[in-house]
Image (cartoon, rainbow, N blue to C red):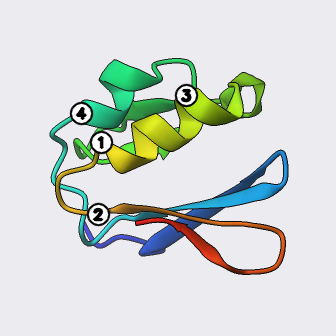
Amino acid sequence: MSRVTDVVERRIGDLTVRIDRQLCVGFGDCIEEAPESFVLDEEGIAVFTDGAEKIERARLLKACQSCPVDALSVVDADGTPVVP
């Protein structure tokens, strides 16, 4: 099955979080850190949950930093990279 989109992004507070579906290999470290924000889909790739926005900033950043393949990236409102 081909993937419709390779990068999914969501605005969470003043941050934009991106999941690069080509890079994600499903280790699940982000889910371990923030299960209210991330889950694995049927392909074993990280996706946002419906309640992803309800996480505090520090936990969100820790979850994104935990990705061993840098499939998660974060930029601030000015477009400045925060993670990785």
**Residue at which label 4 appears:** 28
Classify residue 43 as left or right of residue 13. left
**Residue at which label 1 appears:** 66
Q: Distance between the residues labelled 1 and 4?
A: 9 Å
Please report whichever mark, 2 or 3, sits nearer to the chain's N-terminal start. Answer: 3
Q: Which residue is drawn at 24% across and 33% down?
A: 28
**Residue at which label 2 appears:** 70
Image position of 4 with respect to 66: above or below: below
CB atoms at circles 3 and 1 under 8 Å apart?
Answer: no
Q: How far apart are marks 2 and 1 (CA)?
A: 8 Å
Which quadrant of the rendered structure holds the N terminus?
bottom left
Q: What element carries label 4?
A: loop
User: Dot 3, how many residues are within 10 Å of its Cα: few (below 14), some (14-19), or many (20+)?
Assistant: some
Q: What element carries label 3?
A: helix
User: Dot 1, how many residues are within 10 Å of its Cα: few (below 14), some (14-19), or many (20+)?
Assistant: many
Going by the numbered disc 4, the residue's amino acid type is: Gly
